[in-house]
Amino acid sequence: MTESTVSRRRAIALAGAGVAGIAGAAAVGGAVVRTAEQSHPAQAGAAAADAIAFTGAHQAGIVTPAQDRLHFVAFDVVTKDRARLVRMLKDWTAAAARLTAGRDAGEIGAVGGILEAPPDDTGEAIGLPASGLTLTVGFGPTLFRDAAGKDRFGIAAQRPAALVDLPHFPGDLIEAPISGGDICVQACANDPQVAVHAIRNLARIGMGVVTVRWSQLGFGRTSSTTRDQATPRNMFGFKDGTANLKAEETDLLRDHLWVQPGDGPAWMTGGAYVVTRKVRMLIETWDRTSLGEQEDIIGRTKGSGAPLGRADEFDEPDLEAKRPDGEPVIAIDSHVRLAHPTQNSNARMLRRGYNFVDGSDGLGRLNAGLFFIGYQRDPRTAFVPVQLNLARHDAMNEYVRHVSSGIFACPPGVTGASDYWGSTLFA
Amino acid sequence: MTESTVSRRRAIALAGAGVAGIAGAAAVGGAVVRTAEQSHPAQAGAAAADAIAFTGAHQAGIVTPAQDRLHFVAFDVVTKDRARLVRMLKDWTAAAARLTAGRDAGEIGAVGGILEAPPDDTGEAIGLPASGLTLTVGFGPTLFRDAAGKDRFGIAAQRPAALVDLPHFPGDLIEAPISGGDICVQACANDPQVAVHAIRNLARIGMGVVTVRWSQLGFGRTSSTTRDQATPRNMFGFKDGTANLKAEETDLLRDHLWVQPGDGPAWMTGGAYVVTRKVRMLIETWDRTSLGEQEDIIGRTKGSGAPLGRADEFDEPDLEAKRPDGEPVIAIDSHVRLAHPTQNSNARMLRRGYNFVDGSDGLGRLNAGLFFIGYQRDPRTAFVPVQLNLARHDAMNEYVRHVSSGIFACPPGVTGASDYWGSTLFA
């Protein structure tokens, strides 16, 4: 939608303000307009209580306390026109600022416009509060140079070296149609309808510029991102994310999460790289495995989440401890050991993955698992070596299948009213 | 799992109670057992507050105030052994009684058993309350006589005439692999992890007897089932379910919802028939439609949900009202008119559908819509004629595709400790 269209409809809506209080439709200046009482209740300001600030040095949705629901989407850019792409990013930014504040996607809203035009909000979130919504954008390798090697938008030279093409990991069963993408948007909220509404409206605004490549819903966050969040459980029934990077650990975030000056092209300073992996879990097989074997594979007790041989969830795993029979208490091929920073040159990530169930698989089984989301300063020294280690040795591999993969460069936060998603890259 | 297995493990667990308080594993009587402190926190009783009663004359999950989240599953029965099927239904009933009370699926639980055996609960709901979970079972036509015409379980004579094979409706694009099924279970809860956990554990218990044919997650209930619930919005952005049957309308429930004595085989008295339809909405097309056209198609205003020409959501639609130009205010092909009881020989249903988003469709669009769930006394006089009317005339058909269809006979409620799902059919 162009600014002039918005302005025209806005003017008509304002003209209609004089009939506020009259329910239904009223003819004003030749056009039928909706009255103000039908607009988004959340716009009255009540929603502010559970709204997350949209602007800041870093994007929201990374160290933000992990919300309970996810709608993650990857778009393909279908235009070759850089100006149209930038225009859409600006429109998206304006919409994202409104949506995260609990408002409609556009100025007119779902029911504030004229009868003759499509609304600029789709309406299914009318009456719902902000619900902690965050929207986080990232740019994939193919935005910089497409599959044919073409630099569609004149930004190939700006591609960070850290935005690697992820290698094929042993055991990978990656499905291309649900992997990659030019642009990603992560919507997290405490109400799935609010997360879905946000992604749907961004897709609507991007019509003609982007199409949905793949999208994933998630529930039941599997990681804590702040110290006061209880550690949730994944579909294996185990606590997950105990040793995650936490928002309060500012020194660690500087070292392991946020891109620092000099790391690469300046436009990414203050940003982070995100890796997504859809990990199908073979839960029926897992459910037939004994409790002891499950715990040996994870390296933690199922009840408390304590590392094997320790008493408390947050106790440091003792990777040296031996059983009476001389075998390590925490098995050599256990997930906790193989993913531990000391086994990976001190690699750390901020994980904020979600459980998923996507119906069934046609073979009598639920299609369920973990949608892994890991933010990091440099995937070359974090996700890639850790995943290589896991893919080669992890006893858990018998029960998981990686079917989708993505990597995106998430720029720094939007810092003012005229700023927009990607401004440091496209300005 | 047989009773003797449970008893053995239970005995071992009880033997281990003497070491309660010692974290981790301890060797007792030659077997390693978990200590009581690791068992399901919800078993302490704190969960009772948000638990829905499992027993009653009718099954819970029908007139129960609609919870926010859904996991619906249809199973194929893979055994030909009636005794095994009945055994599983009894095991399911025991598990359902526990799960809806916020407890583990089995007596031992996720972490209460021995290390050498698989847990009898999968663990991902440890620490979560009952969350309003309801589990509702139904039997499909193929349970009575399979696709080959075989009466596998000696119940063909008990098939109610009301449990019809749904006809092909005009425009239907039904996909067989995600339709039908021998047994359905509807899990509704206020936490998706709790709903998913329940279905997953029933599938685990049913291993070797049933396999998952299809399953559907939903969010954002699209109907109210009690008068104090606000009417939610569907993915078209409109309020849905305003004129639904409500739990308080006991006379209407008797006439339109609950199977009455003499309606058919006695085993269904107090039960209801459920029809499920997965209705894909072409939301991208809808979003390009003008507000006025959207409202004409629905027959209600998008803002307040009032019938066109009326002021309030709960005002009765005036199907006779004419515009100045002589055309009806509520269009002849509008959804509200075509679905109205007066246009369908007074047919009524209790709807409790959910919105869904199942990723994207590979064509750049979100795969989203409505999972319709309608409970009724007799589909021959309710769903079938109403859907025929809609399928033939509804202006909304341009924007929807019915891709999945199911019908199931939901027996009356479980009424005592020795009662079980299907007892009136199999006893």
Image (cartoon, coloured by chain):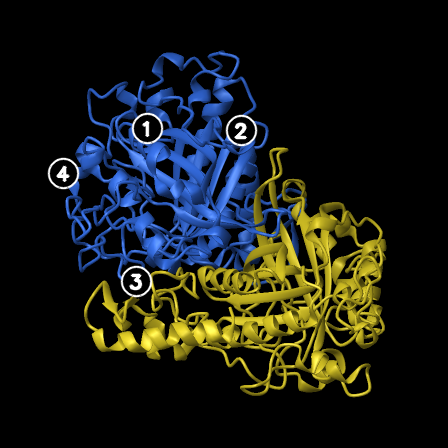
Chain colours: A yellow, B blue
Answer few, some or many: residues within 10 Å of disc 2's Cα (few below 14, many 20 plus, some between 14 and 19): few
- Alpha-carbon distance for marks 2 and 1? 19 Å
Q: Do dots 4 and 3 share one subunit?
A: yes
Tell me whether the residue at label 1 lies in contact with that at label 3, contact meaning CB atoms closer than 8 angstroms: no
**Mark on residue B176?**
2
Residue B37's spot in the image, x, y percent? 53, 60
When asked about the image quadrant of residue A246, the answer is bottom right
When asked about the image quadrant of residue A51, the answer is bottom left
Residue B82's spot in the image, x, y percent? 48, 18
Q: Is mark 3 on a helix, strand or loop?
A: loop
Task: Say which amino acid is labelled 3.
Answer: Gly
Query: Nearer the observer, disc 1 or disc 4?
Result: 1
Q: Which of marks 1 and 3 is nearer the N terminus?
A: 3
- Alpha-carbon distance for marks 2 and 4? 37 Å
Q: Name the residue under label 1.
A: B384
Rendered view: B184 above or below A86: above
Q: Is mark 2 on a helix, strand or loop?
A: helix
Residue at the spot 80% in from the left edge and 82% down from the top edge = A265
- Alpha-carbon distance for marks 1 and 3? 31 Å
Tell me whether the residue at label 2 lies in contact with that at label 1, contact meaning CB atoms closer than 8 angstroms: no
Picture mark count? 4
Q: Mark 3 lies on which chain?
A: B
